Amino acid sequence: MKSYVYPAATSTARALIRYIIDMMNREPERIFYLAFSGGTTPSLMFDIWAHEFREETPWMRMRIFWVDERCVSVSDSDSNYGTMLRLLLQEVGMPDEYVYPIHGDCRSPAQEAKRYSDLVSSTVPLRRGFPTFDIVLLGAGDDGHTSSIFPGQEYLLSSFHPYEKSINPYNGQPRIAMTGCLLFSARKLIFLITGKNKTEVVYDILKSGDTGPAAYVAHHAADVDIFTDIEIDG
Ligand SMILES: O=C1O[C@H](COP(=O)(O)O)[C@@H](O)[C@H](O)[C@H]1O
C-alpha cells in the first residue's frame, strides 16, 4: 500500500485528481471504468475537479459508476449520484450515456442491487470472471466502514454478488453496496480520507490489523493507495 499525505483536504483532493489524470494519460487508448464513493469527503474533490481540471481531464474516456448508494431520491442531499451529478458531471457536461447511476429511489433495494450487478457485469470488462474496474475510489467512515459495508456486515466482504443491499445501522437507511468480489478484483483501489475525525481509521489502515471493513479491504486488495491529510507518526 502506498500513502500520499498532504497538508490539507484541498491539496489532497488536487493531488488525487492529478494522479487519476496521469494514470489515464499513461494509457491514452484505454477507456477507464471508474467507480466513485459518496458521502461528504469527495464533494470537495468534485468541486475542484469541475473548476480547476476541466480542460485537462479526458472525460470522454471515462465510464462512471458508483461504489454505493443510499436509497433516497436524486434530489436528496444524501444521494451519492445526485451529489456528483450537481457538483461535477453537470458542470463539465458529461454525456448521460457514460454515466451509470445506482437507482437510489428504487422500491426494492435488493432488486436494484441485482439490476446494478447485472449492468456492471455486462458493461465493465471481466477478469477471471469478475468485472474489473480500473479505479475504485473509496472513502471510510470514522467507524471504519467503507462502501456501505459497516462493522458487523463483514459477510459482504466475501459475497460473490457484485452489489448487495445493506443497511446503515445507525438510522436504518437501506443502501446498495459494492461487495468484496469487486473491491478485491479492481486494478487499483484508492482511499480518499481527510479530516482529523478519521485519524483512527487511517491509523488502522496504515498500522493496525483488520479492525474494520476499510482496514480489511486496504490490507487484502492487490493494489491500494491512500490519499489523506492525516499524518500518522512512525
Ligand atoms: O456513507 C458513506 O460513508 C463513506 C464515508 O463518507 P464520509 O461522509 O465520511 O466521507 C463513503 O465512502 C460512502 O461512499 C458513503 O456512502
Image (tube, grey):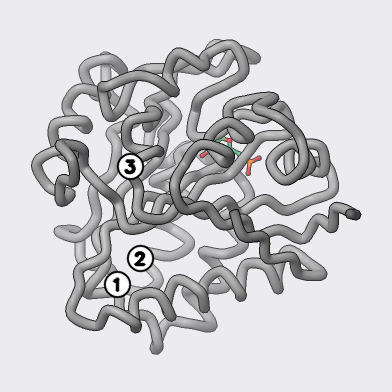
Q: Residue at x 52, y 78 (%)?
A: 18
For label 3, the SS is loop
Would you call the spot at circle 2 few (<14 residues within 10 Å), some (14-19), or many (20 or more)? few
Q: Amino acid at mark 2?
A: Gln
Q: Are marks 1 and 2 in contact (CB under 8 Å)?
A: yes
Q: Are marks 1 and 3 in contact (CB under 8 Å)?
A: no
Would residue 54 appear left or right of 112 to someone viewing this image? right
Q: Position of residue 174 (x, y in %)?
A: 44, 17
Residue 227 found in image quarter: bottom right
- Residue 215 higher or lower than 123, as above or below: above
Would residue 29 appear left or right of 134 to someone viewing this image? left
Q: CA distance from mark 1 to mark 2?
A: 5 Å
Query: What residue did someone put label 1 on?
Result: 93
- In the rendered structure, which disc, 1 or 3, sits on the residue that comes first in sequence? 1
- In the rendered structure, which disc, 2 or 3, sits on the residue that comes first in sequence? 2
Circle 1 or circle 3, nearest the eye? 3
Query: What residue did someone put label 3 on?
Result: 185
Would residue 79 appear left or right of 66 to someone viewing this image? right
Q: Amino acid at mark 1?
A: Gly
Query: What residue did someone put label 2 on?
Result: 90
Residue 104 found in image quarter: top left
